[in-house]
Amino acid sequence: MERSPTTPDEFIASLPDGVRGDIATLDAEISSVMAGLERTLWEGVFWGGTVQHIIGYGAYRYAGRSGRSGEWFVVGLAAQKNYLSLYVNAAEDGAYLGKQYAGRLGKVKAGSANLQFKQAADIDAAVLREMVTRARDLVPDAT
């Protein structure tokens, strides 16, 4: 995936009515915590081979075990066909934060670094802000 020339605000405005409000609400919550860090739209082929658009908050450099390196977002937000996704690319004590917070967030399905849910109302906003704050603090070199 790559950074898009489309801004997150332009992307949100282009979303269908049924999802635009939920993404805008979640974007505002995440942006309030990640203020001062990069907020950009990433687009391209993602895991599983599908084309995705993900609003990324904060950026950091990574180096994988394979020796591959790159840049990625700390927290990401995406509208999928049947659900919304929140990506939290921070871990503590060997576990991704999304899994650690899933039980407190609300009606979510937790993967490793991915949380899936139907609508913004399924998420406890205070717990979301707490998790995003922790993710931000765990990646101190984020820009």
Image (cartoon, grey):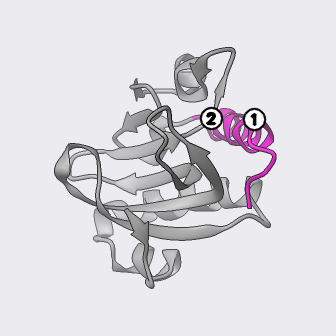
For marks 1 and 2, the one nearer the N-term is: 2
Per the image, the residue denoted by label 2 is 90
* Left or right side of 47 for 97: right
Mark 1 vs mark 2, foreground winner is: 2
Magenta span: helix, strand or loop, mainly? helix
Give the CA separation, mark 1 to mark 2.
8 Å
User: At x 51% / y 27%, what residue is drawn?
Assistant: 106
Are discs 1 and 2 less than 8 Å apart at CB? yes
Q: From the viewer's side, name the closer residue of 14 and 34.
A: 34
Q: From the viewer's side, name the closer residue of 78 and 72.
A: 72
Q: Amino acid at mark 2?
A: Ala
Q: Is residue 11 magenta?
A: no
Helix, strand or loop for disc 2: loop
Measured as percent of width and height from the top left, residue 20 is found at 39, 67
Q: Is residue 129 magenta?
A: yes
Question: Crowding near pointer 1: few (<14 within 10 Å), some, many (20+)?
Answer: some
Tell me where the magenta segment starts and ends, as one range: 124-143
- Where is residue 115, by image quadrant? top left
Per the image, the residue denoted by label 1 is 134
Q: From the viewer's side, name the closer residue of 84 and 141.
A: 141
